[in-house]
Image (cartoon, rainbow, N blue to C red):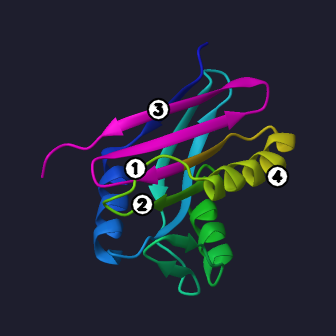
């Protein structure tokens, strides 16, 4: 099976809305989802908002951790372990493309170093004014990258 990523319109709408509310600052949070090892599909099902201790500015975002672990655990338990952490998302301002910066590449490297040995997939998503970029790595499967163009409001 070819490796695929699915992301719901609800997730795209959520990150666009959170981006708009935080503007001109960047924002972000964690991605939750599930994956099917038989069909090689990663499903991005939720994007959580920035924890309250996150650092947000017009040119950077550093995700905090306050209240995040219990929330992720609660969501996992309420879905019988199906919904789990699969990566990170953040926004870029209007003048910056939704493509990874040098710092963003470091975040993807961190995800890879911590999640690849577990056999779990990992995703990084960046949402901008006009589109959302994502990259997924998953053990020995090839790395996927893609762009979703936003529908006009």
Q: Earlier in the sequence, mark 2 or mark 3?
A: 2
Q: Position of residue 144 (x, y in %)?
A: 58, 29
The span shown in magenta is 125-153
- Dots 4 and 1: beta carbons under 8 Å? no
Taking depth in this image into account, of 110 and 67 the one nearest to the observer is 110
Q: Secondary structure at mark 3?
A: strand
Taking depth in this image into account, of 18 and 78 the one nearest to the observer is 18
Instruction: Name the residue that disc number 1 marks.
Output: 97
Instruction: Name the residue that disc number 3 marks.
Output: 146
Instruction: Name the residue that disc number 4 marks.
Output: 114
Residue 2, image quadrant: top right
Q: Residue at x 34, y 51 (%)?
A: 12
The nearer-to-camera label among 2 and 3 is 2
Q: Residues within 10 Å of mark 1 (few under 14, many from 20)?
A: some
Mostly what secondary structure, the magenta segment? strand
Mark 1–mark 3 distance (CA, rounded to whole Å): 14 Å
- Dots 2 and 1: beta carbons under 8 Å? yes
């Amino acid at each position: 099976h070819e490796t695929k990523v699915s992301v719901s319109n609800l997730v795209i709408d959520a990150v666009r809305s959170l981006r708009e509310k935080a503007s001109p600052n960047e924002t972000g949070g964690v991605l939750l989802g599930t994956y099917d090892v038989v069909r090689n599909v990663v499903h991005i099902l939720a994007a959580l908002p920035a924890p309250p201790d996150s650092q947000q500015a017009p040119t950077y975002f550093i995700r905090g951790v306050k209240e995040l672990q219990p929330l992720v655990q609660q969501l996992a338990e309420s879905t019988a372990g199906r919904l789990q952490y699969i990566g990170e998302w953040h926004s870029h301002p209007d003048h910056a493309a939704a493509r990874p910066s040098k710092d963003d590449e470091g975040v993807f490297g961190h995800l890879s170093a911590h999640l690849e040995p577990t056999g779990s997939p990992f995703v990084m998503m960046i949402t901008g004014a006009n589109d959302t970029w994502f990259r997924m790595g998953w053990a020995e499967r090839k790395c996927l990258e893609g762009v979703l163009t936003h529908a006009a409001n």
